[in-house]
Image (spheres, rainbow, N blue to C red):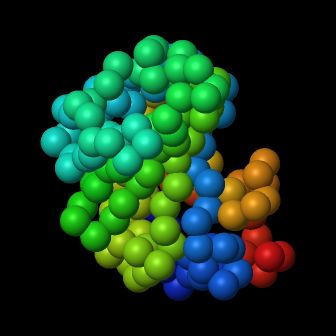
Amino acid sequence: MADLLWDDVSDFFDPDLMGPLPDVRVPDASVEDWQTVLDLVVEKGWKCRYCEGGTVLPMPRAEPVLARPADAEFPDLRVWPTADVLAIFRFHAADEVDFDVDLRELQGQERIDVFCGFLREIGRRLGKPVLMDPQGDYGHPVLGFDVDADRVVVLADPLAR
């Protein structure tokens, strides 16, 4: 059974209402959590590409990436859990695993199922919630992986947006 039904949550995936690039995050994280996510990407065989300032490099270890000086080239890790769904990890801080998704890629039940599966994989591996905030509305998650429920759940009223 699907975690979320498209008809119930389509407003949360409307780029005009939510902004096209919502923030997805794992709060209260650590360098070890970041490394766990990097290891998960490799283990799952998800297509990925790591770059620093536009230069493609091998998959890094979390500690040196997160310890980089503020003036270093900006790193990002692009992960495709499927060919049509992209998550971009940003490495802003050790205490929060953060990534963006493009809502234009997450239209319809099939894509929502892929997205929920991706959040579940990360949340289960870390044993932590994975939250999605509307673009520019940090700290107000609308949905996320709930550790106790072991599934992605709605955290806000779609009509309240």
Q: Residue at x 52, y 55 (%)?
A: 100
The front one of 76 and 143 is 76
Look at 60% across and 35% down and name the residue there.
92
Residue 14 placement (x, y as % from top left): 60, 81
Q: Quadrant of the N terminus?
A: bottom left
Q: Give x and y (percent) for residue 40.
A: 29, 32
**Between 78 and 137, which is closer to the camera in this rendering?**
78
Tell me what residue is drawn at x 61 percent, y 29 percent: 71
Residue appearing at x 49%, y 68% in the figure: 102
134 up-or-down from 151: above or below? below
Residue 13, by quadrant, is bottom right
13 versus 82 height, above or below: below
Which residue is farthest right? 160
Q: Quadrant of the C terminus?
A: bottom right
- In this view, 72 is above or below 77: above
In which quadrant of the rendered view does residue 80 lie?
bottom left
Using the image as rendered, state which of residue 121 and residue 38 is in the foreground: 38
- In the rendered image, the vertical position of residue 78 relative to residue 110, given as above or below: above
Does residue 147 appear to the left or right of 115 in the view shown? right
Point out residue 79 in the picture as x, y percentages from the top left corner.
32, 50
How many numbered marks, from 0 up? 0
Any part of residue 155 in sight:
no
Q: Where is residue 120 shown, x and y percent of the image? A: 42, 46
Residue 112 seen in the figure: yes
